[in-house]
Amino acid sequence: MEQASGYDFSSYSTFRDTVLELSESLAQLEDYARSLNLDNTADSIAEIIDKTADEHFAVAIVGEFKRGKSTLINALLGQEVLPADVLPATATLNRVTYSEEPYVMVEYKDGTEERVAIDRLADYVTKLSFESEKKAETVREATIYYDTEFCRNNVDIIDTPGLNDDEQMTNVTMSILPKIDAAVFVISANSPFSQFEKDFLENKMLTSDLGRIIFAVNCFGTFAKSDEERIVETVEKRISSYVMDKAKKVMGESSKEFAVYKRKIGKPKVIGIYAKKALVAKTNNDMAMLEESNFPTFENVLETMLTKERGSITLQILANKIISSGSEIINSIVIHENALMMETDEFLEKYQLAIEEIEDIRTKKREEFVRINNAANEVFEKLQPILDEYWVKIEETAMQVIDDYPMAAEDLKREKMKVVYEKLTLKIKENIENKAQLICEQIQNDINVGLSEEAVRLQSFQDEFFESLNRIQELFSVEPSKRQRQGGVTDSIIGSVIGSGGIGGLFIGFREAGVKGALLGGLTGLTTWLATSFLLVTTIVGGAFLTPAGICLMALAGFAGTFTGKFAVDKFLVDERIEKFKQSFKTSVKKQFHEMKINSDFSESVRQQVYNSFTGLKNQIETETEIILKDTQKTLDELNERKQQQKEMSDNERVRLQNIAENVGGMLANTYNLHKALTDILSDE
């Protein structure tokens, strides 16, 4: 992998080392902040450290049953940990995580847990016997704790049930997708892309970020090399076609969003592997056989995806926090030192102006929040035509399915009616769910666009915010000659920051530092802001795998799943014409849709999604600004009290502040270089 500006994030070890280094810097900044009574800054640093400490990459292995998912996982782990069989085996979600002591923790659907021995795993999570299948039906998830090198890298592997094994198991797999960092979609080289796989990819997986899916074409090694290359090329073309078709439907082919998406989509990650051969090779330590399986290539791509692409977001969060908190610490030191050099009357005058400046910032922020509310209202109003047509479109879809359903007179015989009824009902259910999903994705895309436009507009407020902070600091500036006479710390930090990083402006504000979008995660652009903001990732996005700005409204699409197909079809219709049968079926369908519409307020659900998204935007700005404003005001109040008591700065205090300022200055310079490298990586995503 290419290095970005001297930084290499291509391996788990270098990623972990960088996380550790940044976390140690943050811990030092937390200590400094607390020593300066910057409690809000210190608390926010501690929160970031805590969240990062327990962070694991989650990789889901997805695909139809009997594609070799469990074997692929065992090959990753280097030993047979999960049960695999010629019959559909996995019946629950199985999570493999690191532990020196091997055991299984079974979480049941009723909320209870049970710890079991590793050799009894198959009795709880498979369909390999009647007893195990019945037991598996009561299990929500099994976590396998195991000492494997792969999971030692803070990577959890999630084995999912076969997608088309049965509908319930498919829904179990779908439930995990919003919570993962990457997915490996396993395809058979012998029969790539069944109709089910095509439909699942197009209507479910491709609503997520294609860049975080690896398509593993399994059972390579049984074909000629030329055939293997042809299979990979065919799979790549099909996926690209599915992706572009879906993007056109969601964004509109003529939209600027589609144009940007088309430029950045890149090639799907398709890799031919032979998982069984890789497992045997690792078990026997046969490096030649392992190379033949092409498994090392697959592992390298997965590692890069996690550490460079997903991991860069984690690193950017840490780097952003170092820059913002470090700047606040130095800002506090400069104000602290200069204020104590002033005459009391001069300080009191400047103090009052600074407090007024802080209140002015808060007033402007409240005005911005009104504008954000207005933007949310505008987005919802633009969505109203789609909402008004929602049930119309759903009903039209169902009616078209009924019209197109092929029937013959033979199908109206009493003994065949049940089969026709079940097939037609299933077809309607599948089509209306897919239609609902597409509409919801179009709605989410419109919300994304509105959020992005608002984030761009807020750049001017961010500039005003940091200009105000600069003015506060400038209020407490003193003449250089006076600062020199009293041994000020300000000059001592300029050399350490400017000399090593060229970012001397950091200690007087972000605008001069060139770090735009600081209140929105430290980067311009909504996509990166959402990705690098812990607050929004956890409260709006809900998971790293979905497209930015929120849960793709899949929950809203889900209420189409309440469609049961329990229609009353009178027996006398068996002897009537097909057209009458279909008309009667339509009448029953329309009646149930009417009941569903009454019992579920789709428009209100969308309204909540819109306002929750924009509220997240406000919360992010509120949190980040108040951390700075509260601590700035607290510093000024403490200085006011000291001036009233006529307390001067001692030599020991001056030396302490100078040491803190120098250390933080160097830390900022080093982190800013990393920040720029990460920005380049994320901008290329």
Image: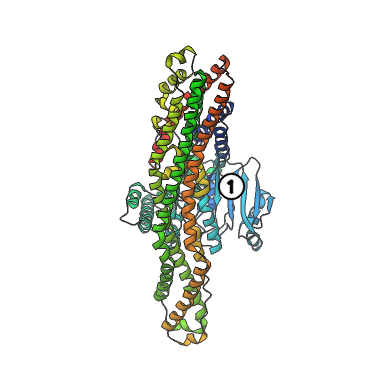
Residue marked by disc 1: 96
Rendering coords of residue 325 (x, y %): 50, 31
The crowd level at tag 1 (other Cα within 10 Å; few <14, some 14-19, many 20+) is many
Residue nearer the viewer, 494 or 177: 494
Query: Which quadrant would the C terminus be assigned to in this image?
Result: top left
Rendering coords of residue 184 (x, y %): 48, 50
Quarter of image, res 676: top left
Residue 389 falls left or right of residue 152: left
Residue nearer the viewer, 29 or 283: 29
Residue nearer the viewer, 368 or 623: 368
Q: Is residue 557 visible?
A: yes
Q: Is residue 148 above or below residue 188?
A: above
Rendering coords of residue 293 (x, y %): 46, 46
Q: Is residue 226 above or below residue 312?
A: below
At horizontal 57% and vertical 22% (from top left) the residue drawn is 644
Q: Is residue 291 visible?
A: no
Residue with the most extreme top position: 485
At horizontal 55% and vertical 28% (from top left) the residue drawn is 637
Residue nearer the viewer, 313 or 192: 313
Residue 97 falls left or right of residue 536: right
Task: Identify the element where label 1 is drawn.
Answer: strand
Rendering coords of residue 486 (x, y %): 49, 13
Q: Amino acid at mark 1?
A: Val
Question: How many numbered marks does the figure carry?
Answer: 1
